[in-house]
Amino acid sequence: MKKALLAGLLFSYPLAVFFGLKYSEPAVVGGFFAAILLLRHFVVKNTKASIPHLKIMTISGVGLLVFATLANSALALKFYPVVINACFLVVFLYSLYQSPSVVEMIASKFETLDEKGRHYTRQVTKVWCGFFIINGSIAGATVFHPDPAVWLTYNGLISYIFMGLIMAVEFLVRRWQKAKNNSDEVAK
């Protein structure tokens, strides 16, 4: 329950920043979310499903939020999605050069992967790297848009829709790929 509550608070970050900046100082919002990130780090213990190197996100996120708090900077608060995308990109790219890939680590928790499966997960990891580049770039552009609702709409809605679409398409492609591989096995 605690994990779900903390995750929900982090997903609501854009909404909380948008409304928080209307009714309070950036330092209050930044301090609140820095505390949430630290709490999440200490409450959510490493499990078998955890991905190595993700601590970089906690360190980077807390660092940015502490800066936003000390500087009382709304701009720094708005850079949080950019920083998180950059961290994901670094972790996913690193996993392409230091196997296993992130997607392979996740998939191997649910199924045994053969060589085709490992190749497929590397390709999916590359797709996610492309997503993080594009998503982070758009998130960065919204930081400077004069209408804060643009930042909120992209970072609090559109980017989540894009993530969901990638997950859904990947799920369908994976099922199709498995069915194809199974029919190839039967044909042999």
Image (spheres, grey):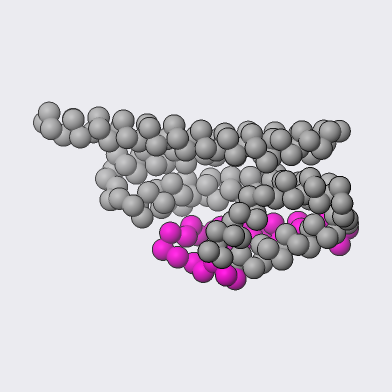
Question: In terms of secondary structure, what is the magenta stretch mainly?
Answer: helix
- Magenta region includes residue 43: yes
Q: Is residue 80 visible?
A: no
Residue 141 occupies which quadrant of the picture? Answer: top right
- The percent coordinates of residue 102 (x first, y second) are 46, 49
- Asked if residue 79 lies in the magenta stretch, the reply is no
Image x and y of residue 16, in percent: 74, 50
Height in image: 158 above or below 57?
above
Residue located at (64% from left, 34% from top): 158
Question: Residue at horizontal 55%, vertical 38%?
Answer: 163
Residue sitting at x 16%, y 34%: 185
| Residue 72 image offset from top left, x and y in percent | 88, 56
Residue 33 shows up from this direction: yes
Could you say where residue 118 lies in the image, as x and y percent from the top left?
Answer: 34, 44
Camera-nearest residue between 1 and 160: 1
At horizontal 32% and vertical 42% (from top left) the residue drawn is 117
Q: Residue furthest bottom?
A: 42
Along the line of sight, the residue nearer the viewer: 134 or 149: 149
Q: Is residue 56 above or below residue 179?
A: below
Q: Which residues are magenta?
A: 42-71
Q: Is residue 140 left or right of residue 24?
A: left
- On the picture, is 176 further left or further right than 188? right
| Quadrant (top left/top right/bottom left/bottom right) for the C terminus | top left
Query: Does 149 sit left or right of 120 as displayed?
Result: right
Corner quadrant of residue 63: bottom right
